[in-house]
Image (cartoon, rainbow, N blue to C red):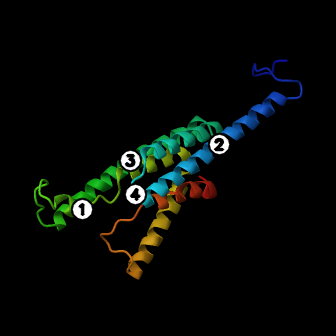
Amino acid sequence: MVAAGGRGVAPNGRVGIVMAEWAEALRTLGFAGCFACVGWAVAEDLRRRRIPRASCYGVALCGLTAQLVGCGAPALAWGLAYALAAMLLCALALQVSQLIARGRRPPQPPATSPGAAKDAPSAPIGGGDIRLIAALCVATGPSAPSGVALCAAGTVAVCVIGLACGRLRWRDGVPYAPFLALWPIGSVLLGP
């Protein structure tokens, strides 16, 4: 028997039910893979202060799968648009922070001197952080702003408490991936 859409369907509609079950299983697997890759990124950022590229690519690929299966191409388009905007904002923030840092510090020794690398200021956000942010945008699609809100709130809360208690100083860096791990949780709980 052929349904109105031209697809073969058993008289009881069982094929459609099976396809829906497979799609839901694939979506769940995509989200599980996304959470696993975020967990890997957090562990490596805490341990080595580096986020592996493969974990970011895993987040993007697993999230892309979940978005396409669960919400379709429009959700993926939103995620890609948010990823582009996030990367542009991160690049702008890096440029502004470098301009501010140049205005506040004394002239640096040449890069070939022994103490140059040790004294060089670090960027407020690294390449791994930016890749993970872009991957999370793709993975969470239209609900990315909810994830960003929870991630930012967690970051601000921990840093304010750390500064108030004297455990952090303004120039200290913190691993950012643990805060980025709040992103998918916020996206799932708060929604679009």
Sooner in the amino-acid sequence: mark 3 or mark 2: 2
Q: Name the residue under label 1.
A: 121
Vertical side of 165 occupied by 140: above or below? above
Sooner in the amino-acid sequence: mark 2 or mark 1: 2
Q: Residue at x 23, y 58 (%)?
A: 98
The span from disc 2 to disc 4 (Cα, nearest Å) is: 28 Å
Nearer mark to the viewer, of 4 and 1: 4
**Residue 137 in the image: x percent, y percent?**
49, 47
Q: Name the residue under label 3.
A: 87
For label 2, the crowd category at 10 Å Cα-Cα, with few meaning under 14, some 14 to 19 and many 20 or more, is some
Nearer mark to the viewer, of 3 and 4: 4
Sooner in the amino-acid sequence: mark 4 or mark 1: 4
The span from disc 3 to disc 1 (Cα, nearest Å) is: 21 Å
Sooner in the amino-acid sequence: mark 3 or mark 1: 3
The span from disc 3 to disc 4 (Cα, nearest Å) is: 23 Å
**Residue 186 in the image: x percent, y percent?**
57, 58
Say which mark, if any, is on residue 29. 2
For label 1, the crowd category at 10 Å Cα-Cα, with few meaning under 14, some 14 to 19 and many 20 or more, is few
Left or right, 10 with respect to 76, comes to right
Sooner in the amino-acid sequence: mark 3 or mark 4: 4
Q: Mark 4 points at which residue?
A: 48
48 or 83, nearer to the observer: 48
Q: Which residue is drawn at 80% across and 34% down?
A: 17
Q: Residue at x 21, y 62 (%)?
A: 118
Q: Are marks 3 and 1 in contact (CB under 8 Å)?
A: no
